[in-house]
Amino acid sequence: MGYSYGRLVNEVFIQLSLVSLIICCLVYFERNTTRLAKLLSCLLLLECFVLLFFAFKSDFDYVYYWGLTHKRLYGFIIIAWLTGVYTLLFSKLLVSRKFNYILPFTIYSLLLVISVNTLNFDNLIYNNPPKESTGVVHEYLETLSTDSENLAAIYSHSQEMAQEKNEQNSDEYYYSRINQKVLELKEKYDDPRFDWRTFNWSEYKAYKTLENVEVIDKKTR
């Protein structure tokens, strides 16, 4: 049918967002306490869980075949958040209309935010990199921060690729994202007037792995 994984995942998430907004409003503000109203609300929420399953399956398949990106990881986070929202709404229907929804919703959302900040997305992406039909998308890896804990390996591979294309000493390579990133990092921590208020542990660890690496610098060319 001409559907790519990317298009499928995007369409599922758009549908999921629209349906979620409508159903959450209908269920949360429902004032009718009849059995029929409860049954209809439960059916609507069950429909959301089915849609969540398809959203998770499409995102998981995309990651399985084409690797991780920040967008795909945040897709999993959104699914996890919506799963909690639907579960709380379901509890509100089954337990009591006076169920305190706001407090557990706030706690769950805060815990999810803390989890996102605890997980090292860049390191996860490096260990399961995005792919195309031609192989790993190294250009995407070059956009990762020092949190990836593999900046030296990314830079080394970038130099090898530049050598293959005879571009290592060209202006194009000098201005490449990865070369500028490494150059700025070394200049920052090599500077005797370094301001320790700007110290970053992940940056410093990356700097230590790059101490003996030669960087393409216009001043030395």
Image (cartoon, rainbow, N blue to C red):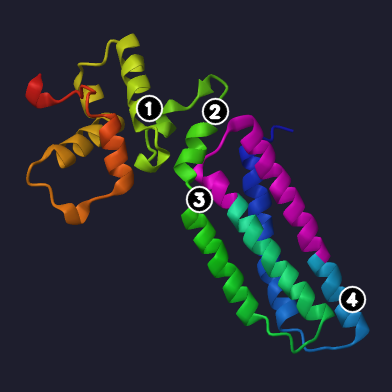
How far across and down, in percent of the image, does residue 121 sit? Answer: 48, 45
Identified at 10% across, 19% down, the residue is 221
Magenta: main secondary structure equals helix
Q: Which residue is mark 2?
A: 131
Sequence-wise first label, 3 or 4: 4
Where is mark 3, residue-wise? 119
* 3D distance between C-alphas at marks 4 and 1: 55 Å
Image-based side of 219 in relation to 90, left or right = left
Q: Earlier in the sequence, mark 1 or mark 2?
A: 2
Magenta stretch: includes residue 63: yes
Find the distance from the CA under tag 1 to the CA under tag 3: 20 Å
- Label of residue 154 in the image: 1
Compute the Cα span from label 1 to label 2: 15 Å
- Which residue, given by chain and number where applicable, does mark 4 sit on? 39
- Secondary element at tag 4: helix
**Residue visible at 71% across and 84% down in the picture:** 29
**Is residue 170 at all visible to an observer of this figure?**
yes
Magenta part of the chain: 46-75
